[in-house]
Each structure stands twice: as structure tokens, then as C-alpha cells.
Image (cartoon, rainbow, N blue to C red):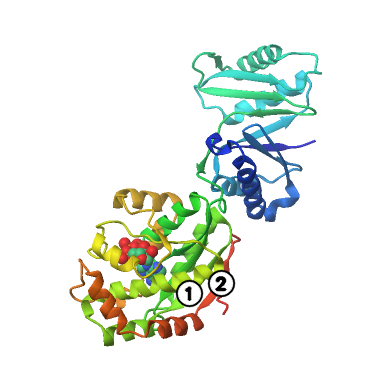
Amino acid sequence: MTNKVLIINFEEIYLKGKNQNIFIKQLVRNLKRKLTNYKDYLDFSKAHGGSYFIEIIKDIPEETLQKIIYKVKNTPGITGFYVADTTGITMDEIAKKSVVHTKQHMNENDSFAVIAKRINKAVSFNSMDIARRVGSDINEKLGKKVDLTHPDFKLYIKVRGKYTLIYSKIIPGIGGLPVGTSGKAIAMLSGGIDSPVATFMAMNRGLHITAAHFHSVPKTSPQSIDKVKMLVKKLTDFQGQIKLYLIPVIEIQEAIAKQTDSRLRLILLRRIMLKIGEHIAETEKAKTLVTGDSLGQVASQTLENMKATEDATDMLVMRPLVALDKKFIIETAKKIGTFDISILPHDDACGLFTPKSPETKAQLKYVKEQCAKLNVENLISNALQKTETLIISDTDTIPELMS
Ligand code: ATP
Ligand code: MG
């Protein structure tokens, strides 16, 4: 018999019609991949109505269970889930396990109600009998008060075929859509606060992410790359493994600095970054680029500059943070665990050659003229040749760089 069951809920709005199967299949595929280290404990069964069950089929150390809970909690597409205890289908077994479960999960002064359902109609008692017996046992053994109208604690009991599920507190998930159901994206990931949040938000709308980071090592410290690896590692909590492209841009920066108007340096670099993003997107079969731009946040993020940057590519550029306040972005960064990494000191590729007075209202025509001074194709193909990739998995260590 099964030991415990995770009862996973997803937003029913996405479950209508034909999409339902695609949604569930992708979610299960993602869960299986993320939980592969624990697969001996788990049985992925079928969907039951608006829920999906993962059965825990043998005794599991509490620490391992907590790791599984952490993974499930952070999987896009899940609105919440219960960890149900299981027992047999006799009234004594049900009552006994219900008292144990309640004792473990109920707060000191909570009132309670029992919500029982008998799916297996072959048993000799009905749901009212269960509620009555379990209610009185909890009352007697734990001294808790029943409150059927406004209970603090709801104990759900479901008698299924060969076992009974007993569960209470819902663990909230992060909602959203399963990674992969919206297609693939290349996320432009700096070491800052914003782009990891933008990447998370894109994942949470069902995009499968490949990360691209532009660096100026050895002009900047190698630690700037370690920091990005740490950020990507944190983001694997949500997607599972992530491929990271590391693209050197010193030569591009030098060419820009030598050949163009210094006020446009950042815009020209960003344009080339988007173009390189486009190449990576082609390799990865991605249909969009994601950036952490937020309107007006820094002088360069004006409408004019965004337009002058975006003009470099025909691809769809997504900016999930464009209209969000910094306060909200920081709160989200803290919630997803990237904030503490982002604020580690590092030297950013762009910071290296920021001009004294960068353009804030770039004129597209002039930007294009300046861009034409560069041998963009050449610069891009050189950078791509020196690009390294690595796969960062959601296991415990950050792998070494591979070329
Ligand atoms: P962030 O906090 O993400 O660095 P920011 O507010 O500092 O953003 P900028 O530095 O102007 O803004 O960068 C805008 C966006 O351009 C970033 O959010 C990121 O998507 C992209 N970007 C900037 N620098 C890099 C880089 N070195 N590698 C990859 N993407 C970058
Ligand atoms: Mg930045």
C-alpha cells in the first residue's frame, strides 16, 4: 500500500478543452525531470479531476520528503498541493490516522471540521459515519472543538479503492503555466537584480529558458561569471536544468569605443547583444528574447532608447518588468532567492565602458548611422566562436565550465 500522496492542484482555467492534456502532460514531464533523484520513492499516477496524484510508495526520510516538497512547491503550473497521509479502509484505521494527522498539523487553539468522502462505496459505513466517529475521537483525544461553519482546520478524508487519504493544510505553489507550454526563450541575464526576476516571470508563463550572459573577462573579474552561474543555479529551482551561454564582448566593446559616438556606446552594445541573442535563439529554436528592462528605471531605459535597441532585431523582445515598480521587483527577487546573489559586488560588462553622459533619447536614424561604422557581422561571428556553453542542473553543485 501507498505511504503518502501528494495531491497537486492546478488552475482549472487552463484546463479547459483540448489544452488540458498538453498542460498536464508537460507538467508531469517537468515534475518527473525535477524529481528524478527521488524516483524510487515515487509513483506518478493519473490525474483525478482537477488534481494530480504523486504517490510515495515506500518509507521516506523526512528530509527527503521536504526536498520533494520544495521541488513541487517551486514548479510553475501548480497552484497548491496537499501532503496526504494514507491508511487502510477500516473505520478504526481511519480514525487512528486522523487523530495522528490532526495532532501533527493543527494549531493550539484551532477549531476543526471533518470533511469526509467515500469514493469506495463497498465499505460498510458512509461519509456521515466517518465524520461523526473521527470528529468525536479528535474531540476526546486531543480536546479540540468542532466548528462546522467556520473551522480553522479542515480535515479531509477520502476513502478510495484500497486506501484512505487524510489531508489538511494546502501548501501554496507558485501558480503560472508549466515550463515549456509557451515555447522557448533566450533570457538575457546580467548579474543585476532585474533580469533574474524577468527570467523567473517568463518561466512562470510557460517559457522554457536558455540563459545568455555577456561578459568582459579578463577585463572584469571571473567572479562576475561565477555570480551569474549562481543566479542560474537558483533559477533551476523552477525550471530544472538550464543551459547558459557565456559570450565574451570585450572586442565588441573595444570596437564600439574606438569607432562610434561615445554617447551611444551602451545602446550599440545592447543592439549587438540582441543580435547575438537572435543567433542563439536560432540554435535553440527559441522564438523570443527576454530582458529585464523596466521603463524609466535607469536613464537608458527610456522609450527612445528601448526602441533604438529593439530595432536591431526582428524577434519578439519580451520585457516582463517593463511596468513594475522597483519595490515589487526587489520583493520578487527576495521571494525567489536571487536578491542576495544579485547584490554581491561584481563588475558588469556594461559598467566597464559606460560613457560620462550616455544618450537618454537616442534618435534611431543616428544610432543606425553609428552602427554602420562597425563591422557588426564580423564582431558577432568572432564573439560566437569564443562563446562557451554549460548546462547547470538542479542538483547540488555548480559544474565546471565546459567549452
Ligand atoms: P539588470 O538588473 O537585469 O542588470 P538593469 O536595471 O541594471 O537590469 P541594464 O543594466 O540597463 O538594466 O540592462 C537592461 C537589460 O539588458 C538587463 O535586464 C538584461 O536583460 C540585459 N543585459 C544587460 N547587461 C547584460 C549582460 N552583461 N548580459 C546579459 N544581459 C544583459
Ligand atoms: Mg544591470
Distance (Cα) linking label 2 and label 1? 8 Å
Front-lying residue, 183 or 232? 183
Residue at the image position 57 percent from the left and 54 percent from the top: 180
**Disc 1, ligand 1: is the CB inside 8 Å?**
no
Q: Position of residue 339 (x, y in %)?
A: 39, 57
Residue 379 rendering spot, x and y as whole percentages: 41, 84
Q: Is residue 208 above or below residue 377?
A: above
Which quadrant of the figure contains the N terminus?
top right
The foreground one among 216 and 343 is: 216
Counting residues from the N terminus, which is met first, the one under dot 2 or under dot 1?
1
The amino acid pointed to by label 2 is: Leu
Does residue 186 appear anywhere in the picture?
Answer: yes
Disc ID at residue 390: 2
Q: Amino acid at mark 1?
A: Leu
Q: Position of residue 231 (x, y in %)?
A: 46, 63
Q: Quadrant of ligand 1?
A: bottom left
Image quarter where the C terminus lies is bottom right
What secondary structure is marked by label 2?
A: strand
Q: Which residue is under mark 1?
A: 246
Left/right of residue 362 with respect to residue 334 in the rendered view: left
- Does 148 appear above or below 261? above
Crowdedness of circle 1 by 10 Å Cα count: few (<14), some, many (20+)? Answer: many
Residue ID at (42%, 85%): 378
Q: Horizontal placement of 376 versus 156: left or right?
A: left
Q: 383 or 279, which lies in front?
A: 279
Q: Secondary structure at mark 1?
A: strand
Q: Is residue 298 visible?
A: no
Q: Are marks 2 and 1 in contact (CB under 8 Å)?
A: yes
In this rendering, the answer to whether 8 lies above or below 38 is above
Q: Is residue 73 above or below residue 398?
A: above
Q: x%, y% of residue 68?
A: 63, 47
